[in-house]
Image (cartoon, grey):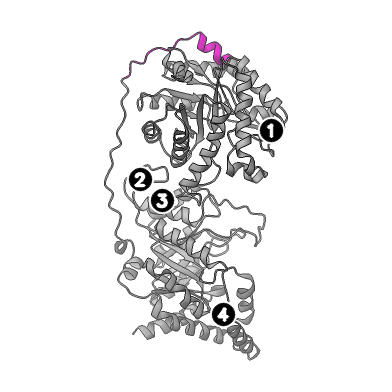
């Protein structure tokens, strides 16, 4: 039996969807710190009232109040065990309001977490979460599904697949876009429209994020990419903050005017997203009645994306550092902190000295941003330009969103940087700005995948960047981890994501390191051991008690304490570092020596022993 929604699409008219649910709930007095989806259980009368208002305004299809009713979004509110009942009741409430004349669409939004390759949630786990939600909506009596407001093509694919696994009801799939018309992951319509078409959706659309004008421009691009019906569901403009509240300023008349433009340009479904109220839908309904859509005279052709063969930069050609490691030579690195303020003279002079002494690279950490230190990226460029020595840039996930990180990394490559160490980073709890906030869009695994994508010629939106980057990608590992099984799983994911070398946390216990290395030797990835020469007993106490991932054996602490009492703590710290490195040299491919408090000559004294032995 043919679906009523498909019958509507086959006709000459335009299908009108309802308006915003979340903003309408908020407008009616429910605070945003509550789960709006849970209102299906605790305040079903309010949801029923909103549905009826949209129906009375002329909506042909209403969407269930279940946009965020998935396992991951409900969990923070303590409702992860109520996924089924919230979705089921959401469908029943909408069905009660719709009767037999209006159709009900089951609303499914993003999970609110990052999926692989950008996060830790697997594609299978995501599909199961979507399936749980879709099954309950199906049992509640929906006529179709609206999979809406997605940025990630991989995630919307899992949602579409989940629905298709349980039923053959129509699917409307809608991406959300920015002011340039790309998804919020940077994917253009020329990429996401053919993909949604290929995956068997019945309607392809865009919704949320932007107002009518931008959506009209994008619609004019979309009609050339598919012969499937297109839905256009804009916000009521861009929100403006008025006395602490986000207010959408597009009038019903303005929305109705653009609805006419949408229809004339080829849209089959119109409606509204955030900020649209029943009055907006009523105005759109009147505009649709006054205007029958004209047949498009434009020949619609699918644009086949030409797959270009990308040849990644060979590892040995990425940098001098990468070449030396690839050839099996022992590499040396010294870690230098970015300066406070903008004057990098002392760090550059230290880098020149270390280059003259034969050090291979300068390692630049990205410490907690709770102090006013120079950007590690900027310092790396200055060192390479003014000191003539390669750097390994630490890049941290903490301080920027995903798009900002991608922009930084592309900029770093353009400026000549080739070696990168990707770390998740610690929250900025200490320093002169302890209230600084963190972002953590992705962890080190997700960012490693991003850089690997760039190395293969495309960005996180799967769009070609014309020529691939050639970063030599490093990651961190902690041999002293309290949960070694978790650390090994995490490391496995980093290697799978594209890691090419690894630098360990500072090693003080050789036995721990020697026990750890056999567990990762099958990866055949170069290991560079972190070495930290203690400048004082006080520093040893700090490392032992306050630095995550560092274990200092009791025997070494006793040696440092005795040396401190005898006034030779720095000499003993240097001796311990040398001994540690000498014992590890047969099983590692390099040494990364820190320079505590900027004592780079102390670090060089450790490395000098290595160079003498290698001769």
Tag in front: 4 or 1: 1
The residue at the point 47 percent across, 46 percent down is 124
Q: Do tag 3 and tag 2 residues touch (Cβ < 8 Å)?
A: yes
Q: Do tag 3 and tag 1 residues touch (Cβ < 8 Å)?
A: no
Q: What residue is pinned by disc 4?
A: 534
Residue 526 placement (x, y as % from top left): 38, 69
Apparent side of residue 94 relative to residue 580 in the rendered image (left or right): right
Tag in front: 3 or 1: 1
Tag in front: 1 or 2: 1
Q: Disc 4 on helix, strand or loop?
A: loop
Within 10 Å of disc 1 (Cα), the crowding (few <14, some 14-19, many 20+) is some
Within 10 Å of disc 3 (Cα), the crowding (few <14, some 14-19, many 20+) is some
Closer to the camera in the image, 135 or 149: 135
Which of the labelled discs sits on residue 465, or is there none?
2
Q: What residue is pinned by disc 3?
A: 410
Earlier residue among tags 1 and 2: 1
> Does the image show residue 614?
yes
């Amino acid at each position: 039996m043919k679906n009523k929604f498909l019958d509507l699409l086959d006709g000459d008219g335009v299908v009108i969807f309802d308006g915003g649910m979340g903003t309408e709930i908020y407008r009616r007095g429910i605070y945003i710190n509550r789960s709006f989806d849970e209102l299906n259980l605790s305040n079903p009368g309010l949801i029923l009232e909103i549905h009826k208002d949209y129906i009375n305004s002329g909506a042909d299809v209403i969407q269930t109040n279940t946009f965020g009713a998935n396992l991951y979004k409900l969990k923070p509110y303590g409702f992860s065990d109520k996924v089924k009942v919230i979705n089921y009741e959401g469908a029943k409430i909408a069905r009660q309001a719709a009767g037999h004349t209006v159709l009900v669409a089951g609303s499914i939004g993003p999970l609110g977490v990052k999926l692989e390759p950008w996060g830790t949630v697997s594609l299978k786990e995501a599909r199961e979460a979507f399936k749980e939600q879709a099954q309950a909506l199906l049992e509640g009596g929906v006529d179709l599904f609206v999979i809406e407001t997605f940025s990630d093509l991989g995630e919307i694919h899992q949602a579409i697949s989940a629905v298709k696994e349980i039923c053959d009801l129509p699917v409307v799939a809608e991406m959300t876009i920015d002011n340039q018309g790309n998804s919020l992951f940077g994917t253009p319509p020329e990429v996401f429209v053919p993909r949604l078409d290929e995956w068997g959706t019945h309607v392809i659309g865009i919704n949320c994020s932007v107002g009518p004008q931008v959506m009209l421009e994008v619609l004019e691009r979309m009609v050339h990419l598919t012969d499937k019906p297109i839905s256009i569901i804009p916000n009521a403009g861009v929100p403006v903050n008025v006395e602490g509240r986000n207010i959408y300023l597009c009038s019903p008349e303005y929305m109705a005017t653009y609805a006419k433009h949408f229809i004339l340009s080829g849209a089959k479904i119109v409606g509204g997203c955030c900020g649209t109220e029943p009055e907006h839908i009523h105005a759109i309904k009147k505009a649709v009645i006054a205007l029958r859509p004209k047949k498009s005279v434009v020949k619609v052709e699918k644009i086949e994306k030409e797959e270009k063969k990308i040849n990644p930069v060979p590892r040995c050609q990425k940098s001098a550092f990468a070449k030396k490691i690839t050839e099996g030579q022992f590499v040396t690195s010294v870690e230098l902190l970015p300066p406070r303020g903008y004057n990098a003279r002392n760090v550059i002079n230290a880098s020149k000295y270390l280059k003259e002494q034969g050090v291979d690279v300068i390692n630049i950490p990205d410490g907690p941003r709770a102090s006013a230190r120079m950007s590690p990226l900027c310092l790396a460029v200055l060192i390479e330009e003014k000191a003539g020595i390669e750097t390994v840039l630490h890049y941290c996930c903490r301080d920027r969103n995903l798009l900002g990180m991608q922009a930084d990394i592309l900029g770093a490559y353009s400026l000549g940087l080739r070696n990168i160490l990707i770390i998740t980073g610690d929250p900025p709890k200490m320093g002169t700005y302890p209230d600084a906030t963190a972002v953590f869009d992705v962890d080190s695994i997700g960012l490693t995948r991003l850089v690997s994508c760039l190395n293969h010629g495309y960005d996180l939106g799967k769009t070609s960047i014309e020529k691939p980057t050639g970063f030599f990608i490093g990651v961190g590992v902690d041999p002293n981890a309290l949960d070694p099984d978790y650390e090994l799983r995490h490391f496995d994911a980093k290697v799978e994501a594209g890691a090419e070398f690894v630098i360990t946390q500072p090693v003080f216990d050789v036995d721990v390191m020697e026990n750890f290395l056999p567990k990762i030797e099958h990866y055949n990835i170069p290991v560079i051991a972190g070495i930290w020469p203690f400048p004082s007993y006080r520093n040893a106490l700090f490392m032992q008690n306050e630095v995550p991932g560092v274990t200092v054996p009791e025997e070494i602490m006793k040696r440092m304490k005795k040396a401190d009492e005898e006034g030779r703590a720095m000499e003993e710290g240097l001796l311990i570092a040398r001994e540690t490195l000498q014992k590890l040299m047969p099983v590692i491919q390099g040494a990364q020596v820190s320079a505590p408090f900027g004592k780079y000559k102390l670090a060089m004294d450790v490395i000098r022993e290595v160079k003498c032995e290698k001769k």
